Amino acid sequence: MSFLPEALDLARQPLRDRFQAVTGHDVLRVLGQEHIGEAGFLSLLSPAAEPNLEAMAARAHDLTLRHFGRTVSLFTPLYISNHCANHCRYCGFAATNTIPRSQLTLDEVRAEGEAIAATGLGHLLLLTGEAPQKAGVDYLEACVRVLRPLFPSLSIEVYPMDTADYRRLVAAGVDGLTVFQETYDPALYAELHPAGPKRDYAYRLNTPQRGAEAGMRVVNIGALLGLSDWRREIYITGLHAAWLQKRYPGVDIAVSLPRMRPHAGAFQPACIVSDRELVQAMTALRIFLPRLSVTISTREAPAFRDNILPLGVTRMSAGVSTAVGGHTKPADNGQFEISDPRSVEEVCAMLRSRGYQPVFKDWEPLDASA
């Protein structure tokens, strides 16, 4: 079983016509239902749902409180390598961009980890460019073993791997996987990834499944908003998340909602996703999948992150640097520009002022004594 046949079938469907066919009456009927299916989800993403954003926001808020309470899990990324073999047209780390390339030594990884751990955070996301010949599984495993004593939860956002490699990293202490499909449109995917291992659409699409089968506790997916029609991308992202939830009920399935940010290179977004459209996407996802974890990163501005907090957000990044080694030394070669530069302490203060509990740690590994 794979989500690939469904994704390819959806790519052939005239989804734009289906969105346009939704009426205001259809939207109100969906909002009156306790549980909604795929057709209802599509209705909430349609243009006809725009006048009902307040009702969608209220419903999303209630569902989030019911399933997650007034808690928000905090994490920060640690970039350990920016070498990349891909030619992605939209990414600052792409092999075609002339930027300083670097990779942390294990001593530097430890120093970065200690600086982050001093903020109190217990959730860390390790990131690399996609260059397994540089930052291979051996290197990743060594980094994980250095960081495991400092953090109860370690996730990775690296290149797609086989199930056996994920099992190896799980055994070393990794419990979370983030992998973005970027776009679910196969033709656009091929255009945006002209060379490099990332060009394999099917292998990347099946990556979340391989991670779940390897024993990952959390699997986080998403599309990069701005590459294509956001309604189509969010709709297929939601169906992908639902497919994963059904087949891996013991895995925490999460979705991130990253909008494109300025980066090295000349690529410009195909479309601009407005704040209202991002709110519509997030609230529709929450109503469709009430147990879904939703991440809003520092790609978004502080005021916007603060204001959308009650509408479905369960995870936020804080104290972020997108540069290799950026937590211990100044750096200007980040993957993209962040919009929210606030420290962990400042984000926590904001959450508490709004009646939310910032969660530094919600997982204790079996090898806690390691």
Image: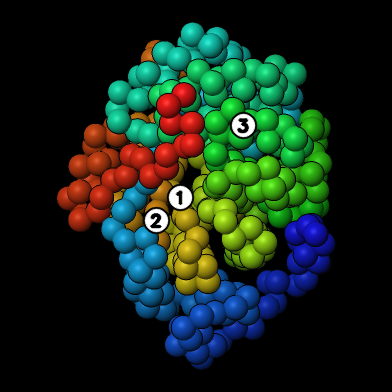
Residue at point 53% right, 11% down? 106
Residue 290 appears anywhere in the view: yes
Residue 159 appears anywhere in the view: no
| Closer-to-camera residue (307/32) | 32
Residue at point 49% right, 77% down? 49
The residue wearing badge 2 is: 313
Viewer-side label of 3, 2: 3
Which image quarter holds the N terminus?
Answer: bottom right
The residue wearing badge 3 is: 171
Tell me: residue 310, above or below residue 284.
Answer: above
Badge 3 marks a residue whose secondary structure is helix
Gap in angstroms between the C-alphas marked 3 and 2: 30 Å
Kind of residue sitting beneath label 3: Ala
**Lower sequence index among marks 2 and 1:** 1
**Lower sequence index among marks 3 and 1:** 3
Residue density around tag 3, few if under 14, some if 14–19, many if 20 or more, within 10 Å? few
Residue 295 numbered tag: 1
Q: Are marks 2 and 1 in contact (CB under 8 Å)?
A: yes
**x%, y% of residue 156?**
57, 34
Kind of residue sitting beneath label 2: Val
Residue density around tag 1, few if under 14, some if 14–19, many if 20 or more, within 10 Å? many
